[in-house]
Image (cartoon, helix red, strand yellow):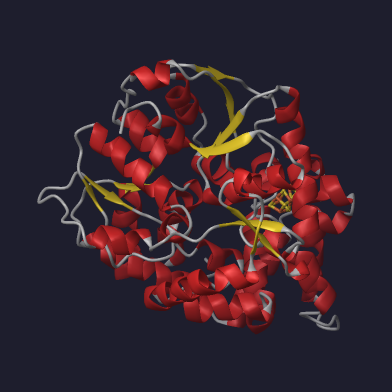
């Protein structure tokens, strides 16, 4: 039985206990869990969490205790335990389910819950919040020196002292593109995502330009919204389903051409939509939708992308590496594609760090709720990159991108972080 938003709580709990009981406690996941590596505590890893979930069978135990909730929240949903489990136990999926099933109304923390329920589900409210944020930003967020670029510091200690937050976009990318007339015969539909819409429209624009450079036209459906990954991570399946339905409807109107997502976390989650529905009309629609979804690196490789050489590019020398987002490598099995694309850019010296499987510590809302631990995980990720003396880290997930932006700034590191399409975009003149 599949546990989802329609499943009644007793059945869902029963299924959860059955799934957790499949763990044979071999401990293989201990060596790969980023949380366990930093905390050294059994409760940090899948084995410990699954044991605690199993113990919920004992009715005498107080379910939904604060401590248990805290332990279940200590997971990046990175999937390293699942990838390495000899017993095929899907630790990350069970932990994600436990958040909704065991704690329902009490998970996640109230501010995040309200944001997911009332803001993320409404693109209009998101736009209003963006507008208000633009006005209030100068009062609540201190600028750090101009030479550091577009970064801002968030002064609330509960969100991480001096956390770097990028400047909000002048206007949402979707608003800008909705004013442009799209081609009568588009070849590609673009999924923008929240970060590409409100924080980094330049990344979305670079993706559009690269696709256009291949003589393909791009359509950007106005009615698309958040992919739902954050609601999924918080165990809020109903919100996740609502967001999935909105996106399925918005993209059904675009025909049958590929749906390309520049963010690898978005593309992984969009591909996972059929799992959210039982066997009904929506499941079929979700299947048709997800079959069209391509991560940007996957799309470009399949379409035979070759960077055009400009005089400017030839003068630039780059020593760079690629940080594999967990949602690209583990959840989509994509590893070679981004490397192939980057190596094709003139002037690029591509460096492997030999630690490509390390998580950066972002984990969706994990780096908000567990900021200090998330930064420890980041420091382990950046160490081998520092040793290879690269000048740029490239990635393709907006969550990883933000994590590197903040982590590098916190340690005064001069390595730059770039999105894959930004590097490819530099290979042709604008
Ligand atoms: S590797 Fe799998 S079976 Fe072994 S302890 Fe971890 S979750 Fe359980
Ligand atoms: S999903 Fe990642 S962080 Fe969570 S228990 Fe598994 S390995 Fe650890």
Question: For the point 44% across and 37% down, which residue is it?
Answer: 422
Vertical position of residue 127 compared to residue 96: above or below:
below
Work out whether residue 5 can be spotted.
no
Res 76 quadrant in image: bottom right
Work out whether residue 214 can be spotted.
yes
Question: For the point 35% across and 69% down, which residue is it?
Answer: 245
* Left-right relation of 65 to 264: right
Looking at this view, is 392 or 191 the one in front?
392
* Left-right relation of 41 to 358: right
Res 187 quadrant in image: top left
Residue 298 placed where, x, y %? Answer: 39, 36
* Left-right relation of 252 to 45: left
* Residue at the limit of the structure toward the right, as seen here: 40
* Residue at the limit of the structure toward the left, as seen here: 184
Vertical position of residue 86 compared to residue 19: above or below:
above
Looking at this view, is 226 or 60 the one in front?
226
Res 96 quadrant in image: bottom right
Vertical position of residue 341 compared to residue 121: above or below:
above
Looking at this view, is 243 or 163 the one in front?
163
Vertical position of residue 274 compared to residue 4: above or below:
above
Residue 329 placed where, x, y %? Answer: 55, 38
* Residue at the limit of the structure toward the front, as seen here: 146
Residue 97 placed where, x, y %? Answer: 62, 67
Q: How many marks?
A: 0
Question: For the point 36% across and 29% down, which residue is it?
Answer: 301
Position of the C terminus by quadrant: top left
């Amino acid at each position: 039985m599949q546990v989802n938003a329609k499943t009644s709580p007793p059945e869902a709990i029963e299924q959860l206990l059955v799934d957790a009981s499949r763990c044979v406690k071999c401990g293989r996941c201990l060596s790969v869990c980023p949380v366990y590596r930093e905390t050294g505590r059994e409760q940090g890893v899948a084995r410990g969490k699954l044991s605690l979930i199993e113990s919920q069978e004992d009715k005498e135990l107080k379910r939904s205790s604060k401590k248990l909730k805290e332990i279940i929240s200590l997971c990046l949903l990175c999937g390293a335990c699942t990838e390495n489990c000899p017993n095929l136990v899907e630790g990350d999926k069970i932990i994600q389910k436990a958040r909704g099933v065991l704690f329902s109304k009490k998970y996640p923390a109230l501010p995040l819950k309200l944001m997911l329920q009332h803001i993320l589900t409404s693109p209009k409210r998101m736009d209003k919040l963006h507008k208000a944020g633009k006005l209030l930003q100068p009062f609540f967020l201190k600028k750090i020196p101009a030479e550091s670029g577009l970064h801002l510091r968030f002064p609330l200690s509960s969100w991480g002292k001096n956390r770097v937050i990028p400047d909000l976009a002048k206007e949402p990318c979707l608003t800008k593109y909705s004013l442009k007339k799209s081609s009568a015969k588009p070849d590609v539909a673009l999924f923008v995502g929240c970060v590409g819409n409100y924080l980094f429209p330049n990344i979305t624009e670079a993706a559009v330009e690269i696709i256009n450079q291949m003589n393909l036209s791009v359509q950007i459906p106005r009615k698309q919204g958040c992919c739902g990954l954050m609601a999924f991570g918080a165990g809020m399946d109903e919100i996740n389903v609502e967001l999935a339905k909105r996106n399925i409807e918005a993209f059904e109107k675009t025909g049958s051409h590929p749906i390309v997502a520049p963010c690898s976390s978005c593309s992984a989650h969009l591909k996972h939509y059929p799992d959210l529905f039982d066997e009904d009309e929506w499941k079929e629609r979700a299947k048709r939708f997800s079959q069209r979804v391509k991560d940007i690196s996957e799309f470009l490789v399949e379409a035979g992308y070759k960077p055009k050489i400009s005089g400017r590019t030839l003068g630039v020398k780059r020593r760079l590496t690629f940080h594999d987002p967990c949602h690209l490598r583990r959840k989509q099995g994509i590893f070679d594609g981004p490397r192939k694309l980057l190596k094709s850019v003139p002037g690029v010296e591509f460096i492997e760090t030999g630690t490509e499987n390390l998580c950066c510590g972002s984990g969706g809302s994990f780096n908000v709720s567990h900021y200090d631990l998330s930064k420890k995980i980041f420091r382990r990720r950046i160490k081998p990159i520092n040793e290879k003396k690269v000048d740029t880290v490239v990635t393709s997930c907006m969550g990883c991108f933000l994590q590197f932006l903040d982590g590098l700034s916190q340690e005064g590191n001069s390595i730059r972080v770039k999105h894959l399409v930004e590097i490819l975009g530099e290979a042709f003149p604008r």
